[in-house]
Image (cartoon, coloured by chain):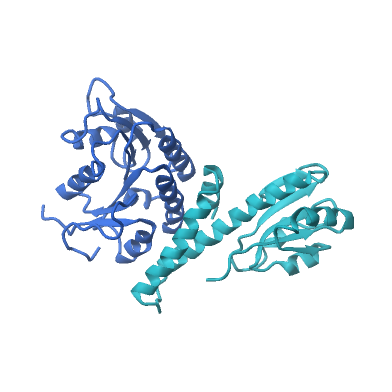
Amino acid sequence: MTAAPDVVLVSSSDENQRRLITNALRDRLPVRTATGAESTVASLDASIAVVVIDGATVDLSVDALDTDDERTFYQILWLDSSGAAPTERADAVFDRAVSRETIWTTVERLQLRARYDRLLTTFYELAAAEERTDTVHDREQKLDAVKDQLDRVAARLDDRDAFDIALDT
Amino acid sequence: MTDNSSSEVASHESPSNVLCACPAVGSSRSAHCQRLLTREGEPGSIISVTVATSPGERLAEWRDTIDPSTTQISFVDVTRGGRSAAMSSDGFGGQDEEPADITEIEEMDLRRLGTEITSQLRQASAEPVVLCFDSLTDVLQFESQERIHRFLNVLTARVDETGAYAHYHIDSDGHTDRTFETLSPVFDATVSTGAESQ
């Protein structure tokens, strides 16, 4: 089982905007930055939980974020001057002038959603695995450990978020 | 399901979420259901999810165990799933008065089903609160195993958080061993019986 994704990727070609967002997050979360579409796509890996995209400065089709064959878990926060996202793939949308506090609370929530998605997938894959190298005892211990984490994360999500994440597969 | 041993409950002493694997036809299913409904004494509230069965059938089955005048009973009834909406609205098999509330869900919409159940779990005031989900076999006709697995993770967490007790019926003869192995880790315990002679 790989570590839960927890990194926030901030994508903006506007240095001030990039600094504003990262300053809102950096004390509490690991943050990476990208300055354009290409570097954003290149930075995506399994550690990313949330991608914050400054849609006004980064010419990025959200579909471009889904080119990887592997299943991804990251959530997308889209910032734009119009307050509208170009696609339903965005999980939250705000005007670029959003407050630091809103950025922080939204990213925290999206990070939790990404973590829950990852845990649900891990739990199912463990339970449904056809080839098993573990003993029954080891398998049960692994399943119990993931289930324990799942229940703790579920308790921090409201019903809508929890069912959205569980059923948007 | 290959485990044909007699009834057994594994794992937790007081499990919140129990998988009840019995043949769809026969007396053991009903007997286990009634035992699980009353395992913490007379239930204050029952939330019953019905898919291929009707609320009326469930009430008839519980007639000797549950008193609707002392237990608040509500149904979340999925009207699709092998029976007609008319049969669903018939509800209580000819009884004149409806001793329970019914919330109808017209399609197998897991999101709506889940939020309705969790809403009722939070609103139920008379304890103990018991959830009877009838059945996973019916839901598996409409949804993938993975999607149901994920759905059940949310639901079982909410049952646990609200202090309720739940059991989830599944036809022990209707699925592969792999299905049981995959679903059972979601639950705290499993009650199972072998095939019954008819």
Picture residue at 42% right of the left edge, 39% below the top: B117
Chain A painted colour:
cyan
Give the left or right position of residue A54, taking residue A93 as reference. Answer: right
List x then y, in percent, for residue A117: 55, 57
Q: Residue at x 44, y 50 (%)?
A: B157
Q: Vertical placement of A56 versus A8: above or below?
A: above
Q: Position of residue B164 (x, y in %)?
A: 36, 42
Towards the viewer: B54 or B46: B46
**Count of marks placed on residues:** 0
Q: Position of residue A83 (x, y in %)?
A: 78, 42
Q: Quadrant of residue B98?
A: top left
Residue farthest to the top, as pictured? B96
- Above or below for B11 versus B130: below
Position of A12 with respect to A112 (left or right) is right
Looking at the rendered image, the quarter that the N terminus of chain B falls into is: bottom left
**Can residue A85 be seen from the camera position used here?**
no
- Residue B38 found in image quarter: top left
Any idea which chain is the blue one in this picture?
B
Q: Residue at x 44, y 60 (%)?
A: A147
Q: Quadrant of residue B121?
A: top left
Residue lying furthest bottom in this view? A133
Q: Is residue A98 above or below residue A138?
A: above
- Say left or right for B114 vs B89: right
> In the displayed structure, would residue A102 be above or below residue B75?
below
A44 horizontally vs A117: left or right: right
